[in-house]
Amino acid sequence: MIEATGRQSFIGTPAAVAEEMDTFVQTDAADGFILVPHLTPGGLDDFVERVVPLLQERGSFRTRYTGSTLRAHLGLAQPS
């Protein structure tokens, strides 16, 4: 069963999807996105191969991790 919710949907070309997602990220209107693979025909391969690189070019998706812990990845201070 799939529950219909009020979540934002991103539908369109890879460039259009990346642009809309980037707008949310750049305006601090999102701290993450929920990808729903059961609604994406063929899984997430197309998203990873076609949208993620565009988001990386825009600076909205990291290209590498700079720390060695989840706290570091999230930019949280290390506990004292």
Image (spheres, helix red, strand yellow):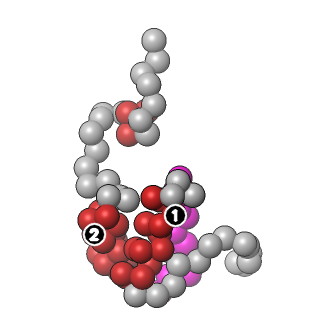
| Helix, strand or loop for disc 2 | helix
Q: Position of residue 38 (x, y in %)?
A: 55, 78
Along the line of sight, the residue nearer the viewer: 31 or 41: 31
Q: Earlier in the sequence, mark 2 or mark 1?
A: 1
Main secondary structure of the magenta stretch:
loop
Q: Is residue 18 located in the magenta-colored stretch of the structure?
A: no
The image shows residue 14, relative to residue 6, as above or below, that is below
Label 2: which residue? Answer: 53
The single residue placed furthest to the top in the displayed view is 80
Along the line of sight, the residue nearer the viewer: 23 or 15: 23
Bin the neighbour count of mark 2 within 10 Å (Cα to Cα): few under 14, some 14-19, many 20 and up: some
Judged left or right of residue 10, residue 62 is left
Label 1: which residue? Answer: 24
Question: Which span is picked out in magenta?
Answer: 30-42
Q: Nearer the viewer, mark 2 or mark 1?
A: 1
Q: Position of residue 60 (x, y in %)?
A: 37, 59
Place residue 9 in its image quadrant.
bottom right
Residue shown at the point (72%, 72%) measured from the top left: 6
